[in-house]
Image: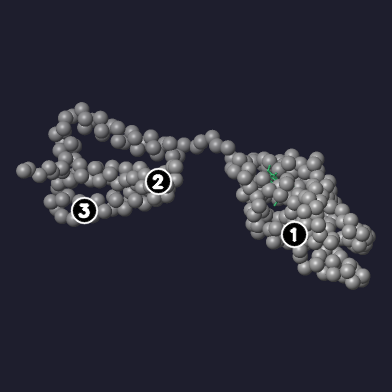
Amino acid sequence: MKKLRIGGFLSVVVTLVFVYALVKWGIPAVSREVTTLPFPLPVPGALMFIYMVLTVIALFLFVTFSDEGLDDFLRPVKKFLRGGYGKIPRAAVLVAVPALIGWQFYEITVPKVEVPASLRIQHPSSNFPKSFEAKQNLVANPTDAQIDAFIEQAKANEVQFIPQVQEDVENWSDEMDPDHVLEFFPVEPVKQLLAQLESGTVEKETAKAALMEKNLFEGRALYAMNCRPCHGDSVAGDGPMADGFKLRPIDFTDNGTIETIVEGYTFWRVTNGGPGLPTEATPWDSAMPEWKLSLTEEERWKIILAEYDLAQKTPRIPESH
Ligand code: HEC
């Protein structure tokens, strides 16, 4: 049986096409089988370039390995140039190849009209009111009056909660029938406060720590109700709605976000949301709602307290301090 033999030139062309097809469609098809994803994983352009360059180098070595190989490769090329395949095809190719290369070169070098790249400023501040800079979190440092009021409420077993969680706490109380509503928080500072209430002498420091726990709880609850859909349970900007926005809700656990800004700035961002941002925050607009429309100042501060706590970050200290 006569072996089917294709010439050196044709086998080079076939190999190039085969490798290209393998990388372009073969690898994505296999990746789809391996990953069982509903879509193939495309091969990056840079990788394609590397594969093709390696293939060309390998073919070059292969063809030039021996004089016979080179002759074999060049035979059809020479024949073509001498007009062995007809004069018209030769003329067509000799015009088309330089024209194609010239056109490609023109495409690459001709200046194009493009939207100028504009960098987005993560923390735009041109319209940030200076007076906000030194703002302290209202609920992070309870005043003596607030602590005293809390002690009174605790003594009377009538601790006030924000309306958003009141019902849950009441339901829990009905079910568990606790001696004191603060048993709702089984954490050390609250346990200490309950023990001190029992013994009759309440220390201010203990009451303050317990009040902070309550504020944090309320802040976390408000966060879950308002911010979680975008900023996520993990506070990493991966809530169920996050993928829907071109400008992703921010990841609070990232070092470049709420850790680098003073608390007054965080408060300003939460208060005014996307609509409050100046033009340098574009080209993508933030979908953050304007929280001053639906949350009181105290609620916003409670959320910010919880937000930093959940992200395990501390706000930047204002320069003047
Ligand atoms: C509709 C989705 C959405 C909701 C709901 C939402 N955010 Fe945002 N948030 C965003 C987007 C989008 C940004 C802008 C991200 C950026 O600037 O890179 C943002 C930015 C922020 C920033 C600015 C951070 C920084 O580093 O400058 C803070 C703080 C913030 N959000 C807090 C909150 C709080 C608190 C809540 C709940 C009261 C909330 N967000 C609810 C989408 C949302």
The residues tagged by marks 3 and 2 sit, at their Cα atoms, a distance apart of: 33 Å
201 or 255, nearer to the observer: 201
Disc number placed over residue 236 in the picture, else none: none
Instruction: Return the residue nearer the eye: 136 or 112.
Output: 136
Say if residue 121 shows up in the picture: no
Question: What's the residue at 58%, 37% (across, down)?
Answer: 115
Which residue is denoted by mark 2 in the rendering?
Answer: 32
Q: Disc 2 to disc 1, how far (Cα)?
A: 45 Å
Task: State yes or no: Cβ of the residue under disc 2 lies below 8 Å from any atom of ligand 1.
Answer: no
Give amino acid for label 3.
Phe
Residue visible at 73% across and 46% down? 226
User: The residue under label 2 is which amino acid type?
Assistant: Arg
Q: Quadrant of residue 134?
A: bottom right
Residue 305 location, x and y as percent?
77, 56
Marker disc for residue 315: 1
Name the residue that disc number 3 marks. Answer: 62
Viewer-nearest of labels 3 and 2? 2
